[in-house]
Image: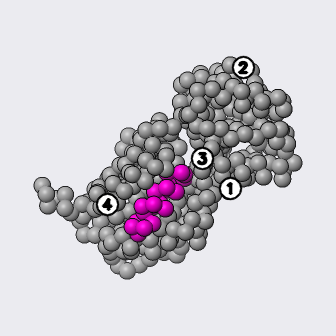
Amino acid sequence: STSAIAQSIKIGSLSAVTGPIAKLVPPIIDGEQMAINEVNAAGGVLGGKKLELVVGDTQCNAQASIDSANKLVNVEQVVAIVGALCSGATIGAANNVAIPANVVMVSPASTSPEITGLKDNDLLFRVAPTDAYQGKVLANYVKAKGIKSVAITYVNNDYGVGLAETFSAAFSAAGGKITGQQKHEDKKASYRAELATLAKGNPDALVVLAYAGSSGLTILRQSLENGFFKMFVGTDGMRDKVLIENLGESSLKDKLLIISPTSPKSNERTAFDKAAKAAGVNPNGPFVAQGYDAAMMIALAIQKAGSADRTKISAALRSIANPSGINVGPGDWKKAANAIAAGKNINYNGASGPHDFDKAGDVGGVYADYIIKGGDFVEKGMIE
């Protein structure tokens, strides 16, 4: 009925449904929708209004993301946005649409250090750690694995450029040798000439900072076909089953090292895993727990603000995310709503971490390394 629809409050999801990370996206949206479903099943927001998730496709690119955000903000009238996922898409949508319209964005997956310094009027947040950390963690991890020299190839976008910068600085500072470093364009049919040049320095490994679903796959395939490198190293953008499906487990098994942000072991994580499995959602997919947390935190912020007014959500988001207050986590909507109704502060601790925002809207993070097993990337252990 029209009255039921009028009662719903819309939250946008800026997701790269098509493009280089398309394979990773459906489980992330499932995580977001799972949070929305939990809230709706436990009484909704603001005295019984239902939340509705409206998905827009960014194609993992800035211009498409701007168009999509425009539609979500001005046509669908969303009050806040989960997303975007790719860093370039997040930066484009934030600068051109969300910030001018006073719409909060909480990204589950954008890691570019560029995001930290944006003049965002405190509207852009993320629940994935910045690559200012990931680059350093990767450098120490690679050194600890006995890899003394590397060549680096990185995709020419906000994600690749930022990560290459922090990794190469940290690896050099740790005494590692960089034999060559090149940026590459995302959609080329061949990278053989560039790879042949990088292979000439005879490094212990090739570090590939790219999206597996695009240049990452082609670079690995052509390197393996030509016997260019003995080892490969990648980060979150390469933690994608598409590599295993296309290149085969045996060709990658002991040649590919991957690190990626993960969720710290916690009661919140355990509760989320259990609920996700019951809901038919894969809790271990890259950034799925972060997608859930981002949507849940926006819902809590709306409830805390006592209003779906776009301009009130940012301050409320900081209030529900940061200490102090009654601890609430995944599955605790009723508890949280009751506490807010009683005038108490709450502190959300998420499936993917405590998510205490700093001044820039960034959070700390933990990382794990991943091994290939049974056709997928399986978390091996936390990296200190």
- Number of marks in the rendered image: 4
Is label 4 in a helix, a strand or a loop?
helix
Q: Report how far apart the C-alphas of labels 1 and 4 lie in the structure.
A: 35 Å
Q: Are marks 4 and 2 in contact (CB under 8 Å)?
A: no
First in sequence, mark 1 or 4: give its number: 4
**What label does residue 133 carry, if any?**
1
Q: Nearer the viewer, mark 2 or mark 3?
A: 3
Where does label 4 land, which residue?
Answer: 74
Residue at horizontal 72 percent and vertical 39 percent from the top: 182
Q: Which residues are magenta?
A: 87-110
Label 1 amino acid? Tyr
Q: Report how far apart the C-alphas of labels 4 and 2 lie in the structure.
A: 50 Å
Q: Nearer the viewer, mark 1 or mark 4?
A: 4
Is label 1 in a helix, a strand or a loop?
helix
Residue at horizontal 23 percent and vertical 65 percent from the top: 48
Label 4 amino acid? Asn
Is residue 143 visible from the viewing direction of this image? yes
Q: Does residue 337 belong to the magenta stretch?
A: no
Where does label 2 land, which residue?
Answer: 226
